[in-house]
Image (cartoon, rainbow, N blue to C red):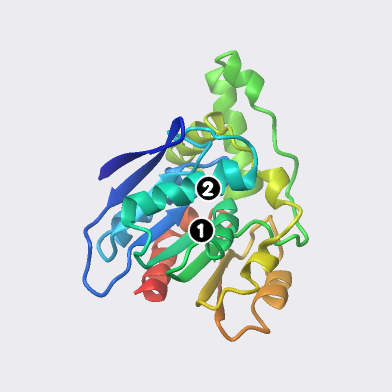
Amino acid sequence: MKIHQMTYQDGQVSWREFGLPRANTLPLILLHGGHGSWEHWIKNIEFLAEHFQIFVPDMPGFGDSSFFGGDLQSGMLSPLLASLNDLVGSDTAIQIAGFSFGGFVAAHLVNQRSGINRIALLGSAGHAGPRRPRGELLAWRELYESQNWSGLKAVMRENLYQHMISEDDRIDDFAIRVHQDACTRTRFRSKPIARPGGLAEQLATYSGPTLFVWGEHDVTCTSDYLIEKFVESYTNRSKSIVQDSGHWVQYEKAEQVNQLLLEWFK
């Protein structure tokens, strides 16, 4: 792994690089979700890096990257795109997989950068469709500020079950640690930006092949709505419903999603 701290204005965007350049294979960019970090892809990177050169950021306002403000364009897209181009070259063709809010970001990037040959959107935000929540997410900030670590861990575990992972017994200590670290270091607020919609409009003019991936039990939307709105009438779009899985599909069903992404991008 190589870590690149790419300077932008008075801050930096942190990128991690895995794997080596490969002939006839484009670099693959992996974008994490809201309240996330590069570790949203922790179960996928090792496998995918055997086949692609991988670049994974902490997007602006998350993890190790600086916060540039809460506006989508100036606070997220501009620093992310500038640092990406500095890292791989503005003329380099790439492909992108985006999870949740990262899918929404990917949909914007295809309109702001040429050479994005194909994309995969996993549980993408910005669809404006019906949600099916299991229950209310629990507040955690007071527990964190008071350093009540056992209470914080319990809340993080419950929130993973409510929103991210479909079966309680699949929530291991590693998932809790990744989620807790990401949540406590999130400064960019993605929900008010992506929840109203906009995904369809951003993808309307993109002609590259697009794969939509959803977990069968993803609480953020129903697959029937997503297929009808985003896939059925488009010749350049494909879909995959991952059975027995929730929103964080690439963690919960890593082997299946890894193979799916290999076949799509290879």
Q: Amino acid at mark 2?
A: Ser
Q: Secondary structure at mark 1?
A: strand
Question: Quick check: 74 above or below 110?
Answer: above
Q: Quadrant of the N terminus?
A: top left
Question: Quick check: 231 above or below 235?
Answer: above
197 sits to left or right of 92:
right
Q: Amino acid at mark 1?
A: Gly
* Mark identifier at residue 98: 1
Front residue of this view, candidates 225 and 217 = 225
Q: Residue at x 57, y 73 (%)?
A: 206
Residue 207 seen by the camera: yes
Q: Secondary structure at mark 2?
A: helix
Q: Quadrant of the C terminus?
A: bottom left
Front residue of this view, candidates 2 and 167 = 2
* Mark identifier at residue 78: 2
Precedes in sequence: disc 2 or disc 1 = 2
Dot 1: few (<14), some (14–19), or many (≥20) neighbours within 10 Å?
A: many
